[in-house]
Image: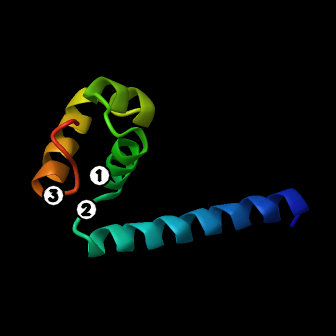
Amino acid sequence: MEKADLIGESIDFVHRFTMKSLQKQAEDHGVTIPQVRIIGEVFAHKTVSIKQLCQNLKMTQSTVFRYCGATYLKGFSSENT
């Protein structure tokens, strides 16, 4: 196995492990990974529009709107989103 292949496989392994760990932590708090991303954006920018969230997160407006609603109902977000 070449060094580049080994490095690539190692990066893939670390990425999968990190994502599984993040997913478990999110689930423990009753949210999904997309909701965590939205919460992070809202806290980073304090006030952010749905349009800006769509652009920053590369998500459709309907997806962001749906996740913002679910996140708000769970008490993680403010009325400014």
The mark lying in front, picked from 2 and 3, is 3
Sequence-first tag of 2 and 3: 2
75 lies above or below 46 = below
60 lies above or below 31 = above
Residue type at mark 1 is: Gln
Q: In the rendered image, which residue does mark 3 sit on?
A: 75
Q: Dot 2: what SS? A: loop
Alpha carbon distance from label 2 to label 3: 11 Å
Instruction: Place residue 7 in its image quadrant.
Output: bottom right
Mark drawn on residue 35 = 1
Residue type at mark 3 is: Gly
Which residue occupies 22% across, 68% down?
30
Alpha carbon distance from label 3 to label 1: 12 Å
Q: Dot 3: what SS? A: loop
The mark lying in front, picked from 3 and 1, is 3
Where in the figure is residue 18, as x and y percent of width and height? 54, 68
Q: In the rendered image, which residue does mark 2 sit on?
A: 31
Quadrant where the C terminus sits is top left
C-beta proximity under 8 Å, tags 2 and 1: yes
Instruction: Choose between 13 and 69: the one closer to the eye.
Output: 69
Q: Is residue 11 left or right of residue 70?
A: right
Sequence-first tag of 3 and 1: 1
Instruction: Place residue 32 in its image quadrant.
Output: bottom left
Q: Residue furthest top?
A: 51
